[in-house]
Image (tube, grey):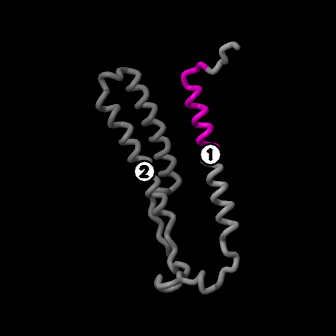
Amino acid sequence: MSHMETAHPYFGVFIMLLLATVIFFGIVYLAKSVGAALARKDTEKLKLSIYECGPEPNKQPNKISVQFYTFALLFILFDIEIIFMFPWAVNFKLLGIYGFVAIVFFLTLLTIGFIYEWRKGALQWHSIA
């Protein structure tokens, strides 16, 4: 009998990963099936009501402005810019001209995005009235 082509060093790991995935989804399916079969089907309105959790939830009377979301998104964008620039600044001499060209390209893209947001009015705070 000839030696099979299973001599790759990661073949055993692949088989274990495949087996673990099949077992995981099998257990999830089994738990879902057993839970659905054993669950009581008669739900009462009293069981679904709030129990000592305060007043019943109502729709919020005031609307939250989209400006908060936009400002948060822009903050994250420019905060991540600084996070990417810090390692570049630390290794500036080591990176040489390639690092300089890369950061100029990166800053150019961010500047274009900033100008776009500025022209679209995302940095202006609109009044709700």
In the image: residue 98, left or right of residue 22: left
Q: What x and y, as percent, mark residue 112?
A: 49, 41
In the image: residue 96, left or right of residue 10: left
Q: Quadrant of residue 9?
A: top right
Residue occupying image coordinates x 55% and y 31%: 13
Disc 2 crowd, CA 10 A, few/some/many (<14, 14-19, 20+): few
Seen in the picture, residue 104 relative to 80 is either above or below; the reply is: above
Q: Main secondary structure of the magenta part?
A: helix
Residue at mark 1: 23
Seen in the picture, residue 42 relative to 122 is either above or below; the reply is: below
Q: Nearer the viewer, residue 49 or 124?
A: 49
Disc 1 crowd, CA 10 A, few/some/many (<14, 14-19, 20+): few
Residue occupying image coordinates x 50% and y 68%: 65
Q: Amino acid at mark 2?
A: Ile
Which numbered dot is residue 87? Answer: none
Residue at mark 2: 76
**Magenta span covers which residues?**
7-23
Q: Quadrant of residue 68?
A: bottom left
Residue occupying image coordinates x 65% and y 49%: 26
Whole-Å distance between the Cαs marked 1 and 2? 40 Å
Q: What x and y, as percent, mark residue 3?
A: 65, 15
Q: Amino acid at mark 1?
A: Ile
Reply yes or no: does residue 6 show up in magenta: no
Q: Nearer the viewer, residue 17 or 83?
A: 17
Q: What x and y, as percent, mark residue 18?
A: 62, 37
Q: Quadrant of residue 124?
A: bottom left
Q: Quadrant of the N terminus?
A: top right
Q: Find numbered disc 2 in the image and state the secondary structure of the residue it sits on.
A: helix
Q: Nearer the viewer, residue 118 or 33?
A: 33
Reply yes or no: does residue 21 show up in magenta: yes
Determine contact: label 1, label 2, CB under 8 Å.
no
